[in-house]
Image: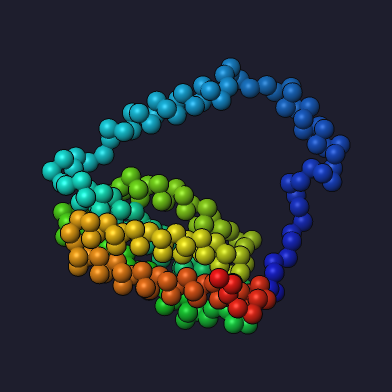
Amino acid sequence: MPASPTTPANRTGVAAAPDRAAHMITALEEFLPTSEGDALAVAAVRVQYAQESADEGPDRLRLTEETSLLLDKLGERLAFERTGTRLYEALLSKHEAYGSFERGPSREDIAVILGEELQHFHMLVEQIKSLGGDPTELTPSANVQLTASHGVGQVLVDPRTNLLQSLEAILLAELADNECWETLTGLARLAGQEELAEQCEEALVTEQEHLEKVRSWLAAGQGRSEVEG
């Protein structure tokens, strides 16, 4: 597999065809927008939606503030670990399609990380249940996290991206994962959940190993002799 991807023919740029670009602009002038308004009107609608959604969600008045925040963040990690499992499943497909490169990941390397992400998912399900939460609930933080990480999944399932490009996307997910596990450990201790905090610390150690492996594979694929700190 080549270290860098080949550049496909550009079918969307206009710099190479200025005459056609001019025709496109003419068409835009002919077919004007069908409604009046500007960005301020759009912003006003966003504000309205935000205010209306503020009162939505489960009633957690019986929970302490610390436990409510902890359940929100546990839901966030649960959603992310589910996504992480799917990302590594997609990475396996890239490995099968393109193969690896010198000092790159083997199929077994990827499968091991996939299994560990799945283990974290099951651990979080049990911890949410033990705190009286619902693991099927999409918490506010989970919703934000899934939206923020959506692009990573798009890269992994795009048939035009190769293994090295997919690892670059995985790196973004692993960086976020490490930061969030550290946050979750602190929140667990704040809520008096020492056993959960210890499990989160163990998960963080594993995720740090994932991060270092991805960094080393990227360095190898880019021709760098070592991972730069």
Image quarter (top left, top right, bottom left or bottom right) of the C terminus? bottom right
- Counting every numbered tag in the picture gives 0
Image quarter (top left, top right, bottom left or bottom right) of the N terminus? bottom right
- Write the residue at 58% across / 17% down: 36
Q: Is residue 44 above or below residue 62?
A: above
Give x and y (percent) for residue 98.
62, 73
Give x and y (percent) for residue 138.
31, 48
The single residue placed furthest to the right in the displayed view is 19
Q: Is residue 12 above or below residue 210?
A: above
Quarter of the image where one finds residue 23: top right
Give x and y (percent) for residue 154.
53, 55
- Write the residue at 51% across / 69% down: 91
- Write the residue at 23% across / 56% down: 190
Left or right of residue 123: residue 17: right
The single residue placed furthest to the left in the displayed view is 62
Left or right of residue 4: residue 69: left
Left or right of residue 131: residue 19: right
Give x and y (percent) for residue 221.
63, 74
